[in-house]
Amino acid sequence: MKNYKITLIKGDGIGPEIIDEAVKVLDAVSSCCGFHFEYDEALMGGCAYDMTGDPLPQETITKSLNSDAVLFGAIGGEKWDRLPREKRPESGLLRFRKELGVYANLRPAIVYDELINASSLKPSVIKGVDLMVVRELIGGIYFGEPKGRDESKGWNTMVYTRDEIVRIAHNAFKIAMERSKRVCSIDKANVLDVSQLWRETVEEVAKEYPEVALSHMYVDNAAMQLIRDPKQFDVMLTGNIFGDILSDEASMLSGSIGLLPSASVGAKIGVYEPIHGSAPDIAGQGIANPIATISSASMMLRYELGEIEAADKIDEAIKKALKEGYRTQDLAQFDAKEVCSTSEIGSIVANYIVR
Ligand code: IPM
Ligand code: MG
């Protein structure tokens, strides 16, 4: 029987609760699809800082690199917000992405028909939305040098090399080939030199994918178009910070940020995580929505382990749970038959898989 080694990084806030539910679902799917998971936990974020003085202990990197995939909860919280930058949970996460070389962050935004009323936008605008933000994750202004601050000035640098753009563009085009063969590349080429290089480079890469229709859009317009008519988008190719912003915006099309998963992939192993944060305000209450994390586990099966049937089973089970009206509190007002706890939703999804 195939055995997959999964590193679990539960993190802070609601991280542990939602990872536990994803594990429940993974165990259900493995028992019916003929493979086995072996889990190993590793620390990152505020909890890692509290225990070791470092938000990203070396052991976490080593364990992760020695496993088949990483399933990640969420990190951060007000408790650690006043630490020096390099000790903060977010710095641990950025360093982790860099160490693992996960340069491509895939963030799908889909609108479930069952939750069509949950969005703040009109059903006619969002019905059928199914888009994918492909965000460059280990370059751009998040990492560019020089960066720093003194008493009166702060500075960061948005920098991309041609190679970095080529690499992420290939990911976007390949994904588009599996979808509806459209890529919209997002930039600010009317103002930024780095964006001009981005646009020219994406156009060069596009020549290798003659079947894919490429368009370009300035990021400010894209932010507006996402709300005006999100269905015009299929794959949105972005740099690091533009993708950070637009993927949060795109998540609200679906009604709750608690629904959307992500995959971060690169040369080595991938990291699978919900796009939401650690929500310390609701941690430990059993009310967090675990669906984004369960869905991230499905992306892990699909993109990393090639267990497509298992991934499909999870996606179907999530849809079924939503269709039957099971909701966590964030979605309680939207056609809920029953408001469930975090762990009840996990069990419902797991049971639909086994049956
Ligand atoms: C995300 C988050 C992170 C980011 C933070 C926590 C560093 O917002 O994954 O989108 O900005 O990339
Ligand atoms: Mg973000």
Image: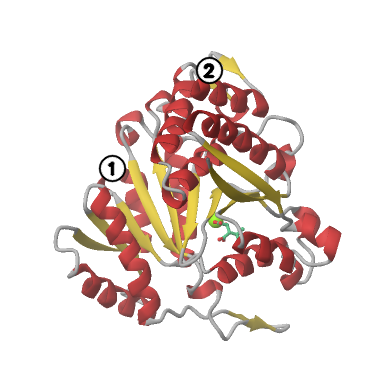
Q: Tell which circle, 2 or 1, labels the residue nearer the N-terminal end.
A: 1
Tell me if the residue at label 2 has its CB under 8 Å from ligand 2.
no
> Picture coordinates of residue 10 (x, y %)?
69, 48
> Picture coordinates of residue 143 (x, y %)?
55, 76
Q: Nearer the viewer, residue 323 or 301?
A: 301
**Where 57 sits versus 37, above or below?**
below
Tell me if the residue at label 1 has its CB under 8 Å from ligand 2.
no
Which SS class for mark 1?
helix
Q: Nearer the viewer, residue 324 or 308?
A: 308
Q: Is residue 192 visible?
A: no
Question: On the rendered structure, is 77 left or right of 132?
Answer: right
Question: On the rendered structure, is 194 left or right of 139?
Answer: left
Q: Nearer the viewer, residue 47 or 246?
A: 47
Look at the image and name its color scheme.
secondary structure
Residue at mark 1: 231
> Picture coordinates of residue 204 (x, y %)?
22, 75
> Picture coordinates of residue 49 (x, y %)?
80, 62
Residue at mark 2: 336
Q: Amino acid at mark 2?
A: Ala
Q: Residue at 26% across / 49% down in the picture?
A: 178
Q: Whole-Å distance between the Cαs marked 2 and 1?
A: 26 Å
Which SS class for mark 2?
loop
Ligand 1 in which quarter: bottom right
Q: Nearer the viewer, residue 311 or 108?
A: 311
* Circle 1 crowding by C-alpha within 10 Å: few under 14, some 14–19, many from 20: some
Question: On the rendered structure, is 196 left or right of 155?
Answer: left
Q: Amino acid at mark 1?
A: Lys
Residue 309: which numbered mark, if any?
none
Q: Residue at 55% across / 37% down in the picture?
A: 294
Residue at the extreme top: 337
